[in-house]
Amino acid sequence: MMKDHSLSPDPNHARGPVAGNWGSGFKRFISLLLLIHLAAIFVGPCAAPAPSSHWAREAETVLTPYLRAAFLKDHGYRFFAPNPGPSHLVRYELINADGEIIRDGRFPDLDSHWPRLLYHRHFMISESLFNIGNLPQEGPPEDAPSEVRSSYEQRLRFRNLYLDSLGKYFAQTEPQASKVRLYMQEHLIPSPEEVARGLTLDDPSLYLEVQIGEYQVEGSDKP
Amino acid sequence: MIASYFKDLYRGGVEGWDRFWFSAIDPATLGVIRILSGAMLFYTHLVWALDLWGFMGETGRFTPELMARFHDQSPFAWSFLPWIDHSPTFLWTVHIVGLAVILLHTCGLWSRWTSVAAFIIAVSYVHRVPGALFGLDQINVMLAMYLMLGGAGGAYSLDRWLAERRRHPKSPPLPKTSVAANVSIRLIQLHMCVIYMFAGTGKLLGDTWWDGTAMWGAVANSEYQSLDMTWLAPFPLLISLLTQISLAWEISYCVLVWPRLTRPLVIALAIPLHLGIAIAMGMITFGLVMLIANMAFISPWIVRELEAQIVRRWDKGQPETQTSPSPKGARHQQARPSGIR
């Protein structure tokens, strides 16, 4: 085990009574639990996100119940990795039965989401929706392997469930709404040279928008 | 010779393991981490309250079906909220009770139980809103998990203060060190090493961390930005230095944080890095909670020294308590050293 070099000759081990008395059997039991836990916290980020090795995915399968129960699953800790990329925002339109837009909005929105942590919650929703919903328009071809088709269909169902859940939520906020349209905006990051030439970070040319779904308040809600 | 080497390796490994995990330490550092991380958890849950139904309610942004799909229908992604998320009254009642429990955990009252309850609350909330989470939640839950192992109430807590007050002068002194506190601190330390190792190595997959432009991508992202750092644009050398110093720091953290000579440098570098994230990139909570977790590498001896300095300064500012011969002043002086430790 790694030796811990403290900052003073004997700082940690103050003299005096010790809370608890751990016998050798108890220490062995705790050691076993520690080994399982240490394996879990290492295997979790080894296995996800991709790319990951076969052993890591297999080990994660064994440890998944524990990883889930302890909120350690799928973390990865890849903050701003592999590259800091563009951010994603969601714009929504609430539409009445006559097809008129009765309200629209965007999240995250610094003007309405305060404090910053609440803003960040909304930001994470738009980012997670992008990660889940970023599917190719065309599915795999008919002759693609069944696992590929099945994986695509599962992701599609997940995306539609997310869009429905958000659409339903926004629809509740406006009784006259019969339809909710959702758009994903990608906000590109300009290069340092472009900024040095005078381009601002919120220049309209840096926003790309695509409609990602439409939720019907009544009837079938196919996006 | 080979057999002798493996015998020594085994013996050294077992002894090292025992010393590393099962030495008793002063729980001072863990006590400070409990107060600060408890306060962060309290704030996190206070912010959920700003749109409690929208985030946690049955008809909020995350329907129960969506939540289950996020967790691949796993029964292990547990949360008590689905039992009550159909009723705003129940949800609000439980939320207020939860806030009170987290507050008690922060203050260290009935800490054996409130720390476990704080962990249950923290996990229940994050499992209920899987699409709205980020690094703050991962660190909040990690700290709550390790703080419930038993030693967190041993210092700077109401439990300790009450135990000191109730202790008969002739009874044996209260424990000053704790093995459980050491296990908690070690787990936080090792978990932080895992976090930085994957944060660093994950970046090696990206070309912007190699060509030195990644820092620009982070600071010029206006959805994150809370401080205009675009003045960096004409200084590509500075951008690349900042990028690769932070990358080198993350990758080397898990090695250099252990030796006595490099630990202060590694922890000192964590301060500008995480404060930079907090101030420039609008993630105040995340930047601060990472600094709180890094405190696991601060020796309890330093914490006690700081405490002694604060007490000395406090005493200087209160001359009447030092000089007053009155019984009230005498009681105050007697109570302070044995107070919350």
Image (cartoon, helix red, strand yellow):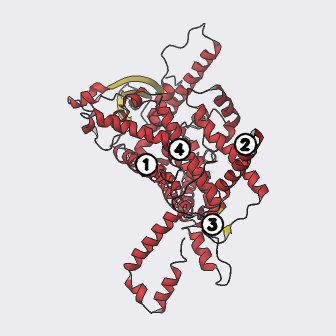
Label 2 sits on what residue type? Tyr
Marks 2 and 4 on same chain:
yes
Please tell me whether residue B154 is drawn above or below residue A164 in the rendered image: below
Marks 3 and 4 on same chain:
yes
Residue at mark 2: B5
Residue at mark 3: B177
Mark with earlier residue (2, 4): 2
Residue at mark 2 to residue at mark 4: CA–CA distance: 25 Å
Towards the viewer: B112 or B56? B112
Query: Which residue lies most toward the front here?
Result: B1
Between marks 3 and 4 in the image, the one whose residue lies nearer the viewer: 4
Residue at mark 3 to residue at mark 4: CA–CA distance: 27 Å
**Of helix, strand and loop, which one carries label 1?**
helix
Asked whether the viewer can see residue B220, the reply is: no
Please tell me whether residue B154 is drawn above or below residue A67 in the rendered image: below
Res. B255 mark: 4
Q: Residue at x 46, y 28 (%)?
A: A130
Residue at mark 1: B270
Mark with earlier residue (3, 4): 3
